Amino acid sequence: MAKDLSFRPNTGEIPTQPGVYRFLDASGKVLYVGKAKNLRARLTNYFGPLQSLHERTQRMLLAAGDVKWTIVDTENEALQLEFMWIKEFDPPFNVRFRDDKTYPYLAITMADEVPRAFLTRNREIKGAKYFGPYPQAWVAKETLETLLKVYPIRSCTTGIYQRAKRQNRACLLADIGKCSAPCVGRISKPDHKALAKRLGDFIASGSEGHVVELKERMAKASEEQNYELAAHYRDDIQALEKVLEKSTLVFTDDTDADLIGIARDNLSAAVSIFIIRGGRIRGNRSLVVDLELERSNPELLEYVIQDIYTPSGKGEPVEIPRTVLVPETPADGKALEAWLSNLRGSKVEVLIPKRGDKAKLSQTANTNASQALNSYKLKRTSDFAARADALSGIQKALQMENAPLRIECFDISHLSGTGTVGSMVVFEDGLPKKDHYRRFNLETADDTESIYQVLTRRLKYLQEESAGEKFSYRPSLLLIDGGLPQRNAAIKALKDSNVSGIAIATLAKRMEEIFVMGSDYPVILPRTSEELFLLQRIRDEAHRFAITAQRAKRSKSIASALEDIPGLGEAKARTLLRKFGSLKRIKIATEDEIAQLPGFSAKLANQIKTSLTD
């Protein structure tokens, strides 16, 4: 490793105190920023044997030309400095979340002399206070229109406001009661600003307090026989209750929290955030990220919290709740709590909901994150331009004459050497061709021999094309889940079948290395490239199809074995499998446990145990 990385510092030079480190390239650009409780312990992990590191970490190190560090006094300071530098330098190898879509927010420009309420997707308006995000624009629009009946602050643009002021004539919104018309002096500027603050307080709290206050005023007006004012309060109460009804009450207490769910695969991660105020869901949003370096879930959650709550640097305050609910404890959780508490000005807790309504909502957030991840992946897959770029990139990386318009991918699945099944999935123009998928039942459990057998059987159809038995048009690329041994088996099958003009590649899971014909050195594609994304999706689909086929075969064989037992029919065999899950568990179950099943007797239980132990 020392020969590979000329900038490697001597171990004794690296301090053991907390600090923040930066990897830089030859031009001085920051590639990666990280923090450590002990700089020496952390940095020496990077300077071990190169081949022992993850492929993405290898690429970062090989691109670097220097490493620098800054010592700080505490872990909390290290956390803050790391966040600040990530925002400042935007390093390409750090986790960078992005919204999977642009959500509408309700904004109130409290910094203005005459605040304005409006909907926007721009979070960079100086001095604005934001509420949301709202999952759908029409929901946000309807909410604002309802609230303006109770808190009639201006919602017009600056141009319209200035024109009304010059002409001393209020607009239609004032005539229908949705604006208090500060432009013509019907309300003073301080009173209008106070009205805007009350609107913001209601949206932020989402509590029944405002409704209770209006009900007290309505009762008082009614007692004083001021029925017109009482009717006005009644209408306001109905409007606020209508808004409250649209926001789901998830907790009976006044919970003030953000709840985070997470879903991931080897390529990407998605986060779903539920914004809960006053026990009600006030908004939700999703973030997605391509994983450039290997990250654990605790590390991802730390970066999620960093991304959500780090101030933008333009002076806008960040709304931080009393509690942040997470599915796992983030890395450096105590330091994160201290950082958030410092930003909020009061204590903030980062907790894992383990039971009750919060745990159920946490599961919902994780489900939403899974959907966001699937949506993100499908969006990339359905993008014709992205697929075209991916196929072109594969052609270039694998040095093929033409783009691989038809790719056939093969995988092998077995359970402890039994029930071996091979799968073939087909992608044409970057999209799955499911009616061309095939399964192959095999007798051997050896992966390389299984690959040889499956490809030999598949290639046999290509030999028969001249006889008019066309399986489909010829594949451009045969992709195999595996490494060098699987590639060699595929090459042997291709040679023995006397088929030419088809490229072969294997994709190894651990390092995502691609082995092709003619070289034992792997092809490494950029982690976030469209071509690697497509190859991995094809490989994962072949793996899924193989597992499904193997499970179906195993389930069928187990059911057949059970149905051979005298007195045990198909229905009772299914009952046994539903209860115990596998043949192995049925074998270790007691006769009493089996006899207790509906429709079973002690005699039948004895017969089952006797038959399975013979």
Image (tube, rainbow, N blue to C red):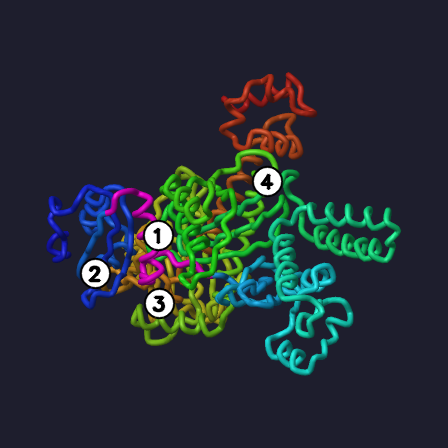
Q: Nearer the viewer, mark 2 or mark 3?
A: 2
Mark identifier at residue 499: 3
Number of marks present in the image shown: 4
Secondary structure under badge 1?
A: loop
Q: Residue 480's x, y, as percent? A: 37, 57
User: Can residue 178 be spotted in the picture?
Assistant: yes
- Quickly name the residue at label 1: 509
Alpha-carbon span between mark 2 and mark 3: 44 Å
Alpha-carbon span between mark 3 and mark 4: 56 Å
Label 4 is placed on what type of residue?
Lys
Whichever of labels 2 and 1 marks the residue nearer the N terminus, that label is: 2
Label 1 is placed on what type of residue?
Lys
Residue 130 quadrant = bottom right
Secondary structure under badge 2?
A: loop
Q: Nearer the viewer, mark 4 or mark 1?
A: 4
Label 2 is placed on what type of residue?
Ala
User: CB of mark 4 within 8 Å of CB of mark 2?
Assistant: no
Whichever of labels 4 and 1 marks the residue nearer the N terminus, that label is: 4
Label 3 is placed on what type of residue?
Val
Alpha-carbon span between mark 2 and mark 1: 25 Å
**181 magenta-colored:** no
Secondary structure under badge 3?
A: loop
Q: Which residues are magenta?
A: 72-98
**88 magenta-colored:** yes
Whichever of labels 1 and 3 marks the residue nearer the N terminus, that label is: 3
- Asked whether, in this view, residue 508 is left or right of residue 579, the answer is left
- Asked whether, in this view, residue 499 is left or right of residue 217, the answer is left
Classed neighbour count for the residue bearing mark 3: other residues with Cα under 10 Å, few (<14), some (14–19), many (≥20) = few
Position of residue 117 relative to residue 402, above or below, is above
- Quickly name the residue at label 4: 360
Whichever of labels 4 and 2 marks the residue nearer the N terminus, that label is: 2
Residue 267 quadrant = bottom left
